Image (tube, grey):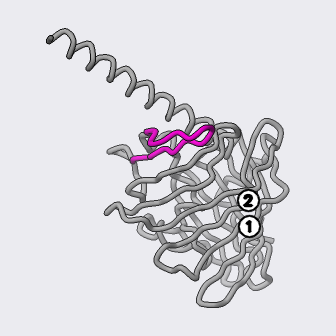
Amino acid sequence: MRKIFVAIFMFCSILFANELNEADEIIKKMDKNMRGENVSMTMTMKIASMGHTREMKMQSWSEGTKKSFTKILYPPKDRGITFLSLNNQMWQYVPKIERTIKIPASMMLQNWMGSDITNDDVVKQSSVVQDYDAKILKKDGKLVTIELIPKEDAAVVWGKIVSLIDTETYTSQKDIFYDEDMKEVRIFFYKDVKKYGKYYIPTYWKIQPLEKKNNYTEMLLEDVKYDTEISSQYFKKSALKRFSR
């Protein structure tokens, strides 16, 4: 009888390990789809807040998980504001006051430019591959629900993330973000998946904060380019002022 229990335990352990390995592979493929070796794009953002809406347009360049640069193109009053993320640190340059500001870690959960995106989202310092343990919760054909729990030593701001992933394109359809008390805080919805070379990416994003039902942020990704030559000058602090013009 003891041998039977041992055999069942070992079988279940193997199944559990296989599920974890499968979850990790799905997350790695999805992460690779989003980042490539590098990616540049133009984005249009619509922000709805307190009964009003406004639009922003920006360009971004990123390389891996540690480097990204963003420049505001529109509206005119914000044109030339730039952001640099480098090795988990973030700076902002404001041309009107000719000042470079370092964003402290304590402000990573603050809203970025009045949207429902956080400074942490812009920094992209949190890699789901490196910082989270993945586990499959549910399978429904090509759709897989995966729970992401932060690793003990990970410097992340979320208690957990639950993602609904299409394993045909390895793109997310929905991400639910939870705070440290495991309360749902916001949901990302994605659609209009397009293929660029060997990569797939949703070109429409909607961010819905759950405590402010009338607020939302929509993003439309345009002119997406993967694995092209991006100047290293974009990922230096001098880029903040240099490329704000």
User: 62 or 181: nearer the eye?
Assistant: 181
Classify mark 2: helix, strand or loop: strand
> Height in image: 57 above or below 87?
below
Classify mark 1: helix, strand or loop: strand
Residue 221 position within the rendered picture, expressed as x and y whole percent measured from the top left: 77, 60
The amino acid sitting under disc 1 is Lys
> Height in image: 129 above or below 239?
above
User: 94 or 219: nearer the eye?
Assistant: 219
Furthest residue to the bottom? 51
Residue 119 falls in which quadrant of the image? bottom right
As for residue 181 lying within the magenta part, the answer is: no
Q: Provide the residue span drawn in magenta.
A: 135-149
Q: Considering the image in quadrants, where does the N terminus appear?
A: top left
Residue beneath the point at 35% across and 60% down: 182
What residue sits right under mark 1 in the picture?
71
Decide: few, some or many residues near mark 2? Use Cα within 10 Å; few <14, some 14-19, many ≥20: many
Residue 132 falls in which quadrant of the image? top left
Q: Is the Cβ of the residue at disc 1 closer than 8 Å to that at disc 2?
A: yes
> Height in image: 228 above or below 158?
above
